[in-house]
Image (tube, grey):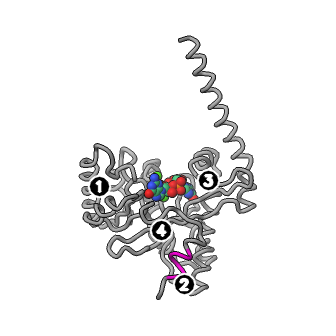
């Protein structure tokens, strides 16, 4: 028993050490990564459930590391949220999306909104609205083409300040989406207090296993409630036709998930969703 505990701690220490080492490498490489454009935009289409057509996309970051290959965001985003670098990465991603929208407009393509993620740190920067406006003006993008995804937990950090931020973003013409809805413990309060435009239901609510009936009841109530509040609803993480049909029956507005497409590189997105679009 004694041996087992000692063994456990040795393994645990190894793991801890590995995580710490990895964190240090991430911090060491992050500035070069921005300079060398190793962070890359992937796009995941959002589909309108009324006509089954792609109606926009979410931009998700991927780190294409020269030695380590593609690193998924769950490895480095938490590190950047701790050390503040997430603000730089957010801004970089917003600019890449503006550049992309500008390119499509110049090519005469019909464009749909692209949503970007706004971390808590970016959100509470008093310059946020100014920064965003400066960026879209630089590329001549109308604000309705840049949707802002703000994770639910960020709303409660400072609710009264958050309310002012949302009002300013609305005045500037931006669309605000509450991401990961239902993942925290104050979801209903957030819904009550903030005039958001769209909510994205957290994928953990999707029916699976033995709790199917409970999930169904909760999702249908959230959709019903949002509709009465005049808020659009999108469901994330939709993987099966059964889930899609269920959401369509409930008149969910939009869905996003592997059922239609994984997040894909920009060129692939252009081939599938932009170049073929007639107007
Ligand atoms: P999120 O904003 O909630 O994004 C949804 C995540 O679910 C994405 O993971 C997406 O690839 C994944 N996903 C989409 N469809 C499905 C599906 O059908 N099934 C499953 N199981 N997963 C699906 P990803 O790309 O690994 O991103 C993870 C998180 O990292 C994001 O969660 C977001 O919080 C953060 N993130 C990603 N890109 C950025 C960024 O540019 N800036 C910031 N601040 N955060 C980002
Ligand atoms: Ca998101
Ligand atoms: Ca989400
Ligand atoms: Ca999430």
Q: Nearer the viewer, mark 4 or mark 1?
A: 4
Q: Of helix, strand and loop, which one carries label 4?
A: strand
Q: CA distance from mark 3 to mark 4?
A: 24 Å
Q: Nearer the viewer, mark 1 or mark 3?
A: 1
Nearer-N-terminus badge (1/3): 3
Q: Which mark is residue 109?
A: 2
Above or below 72: residue 114: below
Q: Of helix, strand and loop, which one carries label 3?
A: helix
Extreme residue in the front direction: 241
* Front-most of residues 186 and 108: 108
Residue 124 seen in the figure = no
The residue to which callout 4 is attached is 45
Q: CA distance from mark 3 to mark 2?
A: 31 Å
Nearer-N-terminus badge (4/1): 4
Q: Of helix, strand and loop, which one carries label 1?
A: helix
Ligand 1: does it lie within 8 Å of the C-beta at label 3? yes
Nearer-N-terminus badge (3/2): 3
Residue 132 location, x and y as percent?
57, 68
Above or below 152: residue 136: below
Q: Which mark is residue 219?
A: 1
Q: CA distance from mark 4 to mark 1?
A: 21 Å
Q: CA distance from mark 1 to mark 2?
A: 36 Å
Q: Quadrant of residue 33?
A: bottom right
Q: Nearer the viewer, mark 3 or mark 2?
A: 2
Left or right: 188, with 268 as reference point: left
Q: Residue at x 56, y 48 (%)?
A: 74
Q: Residue at x 25, y 57 (%)?
A: 220
């Amino acid at each position: 028993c004694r041996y087992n505990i000692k063994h456990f701690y040795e393994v645990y220490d190894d793991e801890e050490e590995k995580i710490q080492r990895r964190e240090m490498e991430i911090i060491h490489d992050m500035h070069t990564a921005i300079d060398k454009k190793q962070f890359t935009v992937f796009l995941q289409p959002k589909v309108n459930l009324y006509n089954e057509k792609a109606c926009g996309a979410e931009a998700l970051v991927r780190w294409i590391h020269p030695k380590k290959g593609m690193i998924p965001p769950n490895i480095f985003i938490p590190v950047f949220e701790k050390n503040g670098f997430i603000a730089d990465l957010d801004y970089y991603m917003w600019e890449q999306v503006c550049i992309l929208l500008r390119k499509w407009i110049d090519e005469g393509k019909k464009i749909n909104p692209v949503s970007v993620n706004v971390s808590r740190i970016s959100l509470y920067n008093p310059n946020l609205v100014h920064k965003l406006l400066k960026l879209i003006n630089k590329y001549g993008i109308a604000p309705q083409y840049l949707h802002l995804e703000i994770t639910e937990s960020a709303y409660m950090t400072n609710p009264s300040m958050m309310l002012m931020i949302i009002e300013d973003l609305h005045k500037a013409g931006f669309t605000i989406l509450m991401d990961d809805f239902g993942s925290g413990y104050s979801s209903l309060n957030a819904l009550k207090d903030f005039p958001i435009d769209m909510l994205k239901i957290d994928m953990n609510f999707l029916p699976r296993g033995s709790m199917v009936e409970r999930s169904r009841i909760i999702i249908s109530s959230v959709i019903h409630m949002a509709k009465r509040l005049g808020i659009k609803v999108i469901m994330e993480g939709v993987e099966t036709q059964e889930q899609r049909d269920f959401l369509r029956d409930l008149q969910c507005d939009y869905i996003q998930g592997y059922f239609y497409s994984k997040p894909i590189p920009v060129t692939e997105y252009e081939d599938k969703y932009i170049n073929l679009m007639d107007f």
